Image (spheres, rainbow, N blue to C red):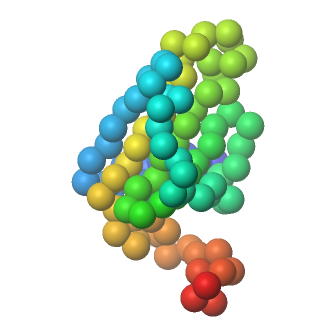
């Protein structure tokens, strides 16, 4: 449920949404991103960094042995509200 809420929030505030599929998903650079703990799932992973959040959907592709279903959505151009929606983890609240 949390990933659906995050997808909706990110889509409302992003200035650009980029869809990447198939083998191109492996090329999405996540070095400067951190995992979004609120939405850690088995079927998808979310990453947050800079002015973007990235959703990587691989569960369906793995379960159905259908690599063509692998998808990443990159929501970019987000401000602080777009990135966090007013919810911050303990480290951000403490300014760390």
At 62% from the left edge and 27% from the top edge, which residue is drawn?
58
Q: Is residue 5 visible?
A: no
At 40% from the left edge and 43% from the top edge, which residue is drawn?
74
Q: For residue 51, what is the image quadrant?
A: bottom left
Question: In this rendering, is residue 58 above or below 75?
Answer: above
Q: Is residue 15 left or right of residue 57?
A: left
Q: Is residue 64 visible?
A: yes
The number of numbered discs placed on residues in the rendered structure image is: 0
* Residue with the most extreme top position: 65
* Residue with the most extreme left position: 15
* Residue with the most extreme bottom position: 94
Q: Nearer the viewer, residue 21 or 9?
A: 21
Position in image of residue 62 (x %, y %): 69, 19
Q: Quadrant of the C terminus?
A: bottom right
At 50% from the left edge and 76% from the top edge, which residue is drawn?
86
Question: In this rendering, is residue 89 above or below 19?
Answer: below
Position in image of residue 88 (x %, y %): 58, 75
Question: In this rendering, is residue 73 above or below 89?
Answer: above
Q: Is residue 9 left or right of residue 17?
A: right
Q: For residue 65, what is the image quadrant?
A: top right
Position in image of residue 78 (x %, y %): 34, 62
At 41% from the left edge and 56% from the top edge, which residue is drawn?
52
Position in image of residue 26 (x %, y %): 53, 29
């Amino acid at each position: 449920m949390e990933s659906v809420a995050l997808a909706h929030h990110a889509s409302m505030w992003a200035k650009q949404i980029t869809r990447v599929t198939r083998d191109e998903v492996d090329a999405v650079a996540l070095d400067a991103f951190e995992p979004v703990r609120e939405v850690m799932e088995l079927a998808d992973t979310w990453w947050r960094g800079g002015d973007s959040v990235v959703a990587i959907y691989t569960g369906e592709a793995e379960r159905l042995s259908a690599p063509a279903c692998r998808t990443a959505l990159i929501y970019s151009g987000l401000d602080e509200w777009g990135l966090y929606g007013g919810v911050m983890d303990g480290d951000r609240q403490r300014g760390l």
